[in-house]
Amino acid sequence: MAVRSSKRFGLIVATAVACSAPISVFSQESHSVASLDPRITPETFSEDRIATGRDIAKGGSQAGGVGMKCMACHGLQGAGGGDIPRLAALPYDYLVSQLQSYLDGGRVSAVMAPISAQLTASEAQAVLAYYADLPAPDIDPPSDLDWQLAKAGEVLAYAGRRSASGTEVTACVMCHNAAGDLDEVPIAPPLEGQPTGYIEAQLTAWKTGQRRGDPLGTMARIAEAMTDEEISAVAAFYASRNPAEVAD
């Protein structure tokens, strides 16, 4: 099965858990993500490489050991849980860019930064290929979801918001469109099924300057224009969406 190639241009929503110092390499054995062999693309991954990625997700990396296993937080099927984001069916190129962001300090996490640093380039390629190749997970909305809030978030996600003062919140679907077909820079992942707490944390990180690295400062600008209630509303809307149904 070929790994899905990303076809989305836009913005990224990223994890911000806790600060850690920038790290410039995957491990002493390998190059950083930015230096991965450009001849290796999602289309070139074999079933064997994807199987290796599954083993890494289950058992961790050579350098980090079993404590590195991705499934401990993200699940073997990549559905996430709690405030941990889903990885299944996210674009491979997007996942690569996020590991690099943990390494260079653009995304801050006391958990993910050291994990990213201990992955070799080949391990990173394999495990990211594995998660990108998974089908979109069947995730039910949270039992305590505020549906009225989610409805308000739907309006904002599809229409955005403009005010007389000129403050503008761009519609999320302009970039984070699960059905999109744009071929430029693949940095706008689908948001359907991501936990409310995860999306709230990432938008807040953009808003407060804890998250950086977005093209042209677009995500920072949008998040700064959003109220806390709007952030919660958008998060509730996307948490209400089942990735498997949207993918169909």
Image (tube, rainbow, N blue to C red):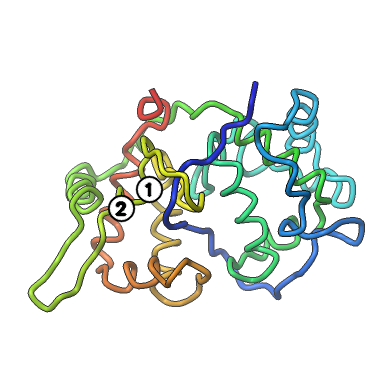
Give me the residue at 56% from left, 49% from top: 94
Q: Nearer the viewer, residue 177 or 131?
A: 177
Give me the residue at 31% from left, 38% from top: 240
Residue 73 falls in image quadrant: top right
Amino acid type, residue under disc 1 in the picture: His
Dot 2, how many residues are within 10 Å of its Cα: few (below 14), some (14-19), or many (20+)? many
The residue tagged 1 is 176
Quadrant containing the C terminus in the rendered view: top left
Residue 17, position in %: x, y?
56, 64
Residue 170, position in %: x, y?
26, 60
Disc marking residue 19: none
Residue 224, position in %: x, y?
32, 73
Quadrant containing the N terminus in the rendered view: top right
- Residue with the most extreme left position: 164
The residue tagged 2 is 172
Q: Is residue 22 above or below residue 55?
A: below
Residue 177, position in %: x, y?
35, 43
Give me the residue at 41% from left, 44% from top: 182
Q: Nearer the viewer, residue 152 or 38?
A: 38
Amino acid type, residue under disc 2 in the picture: Cys
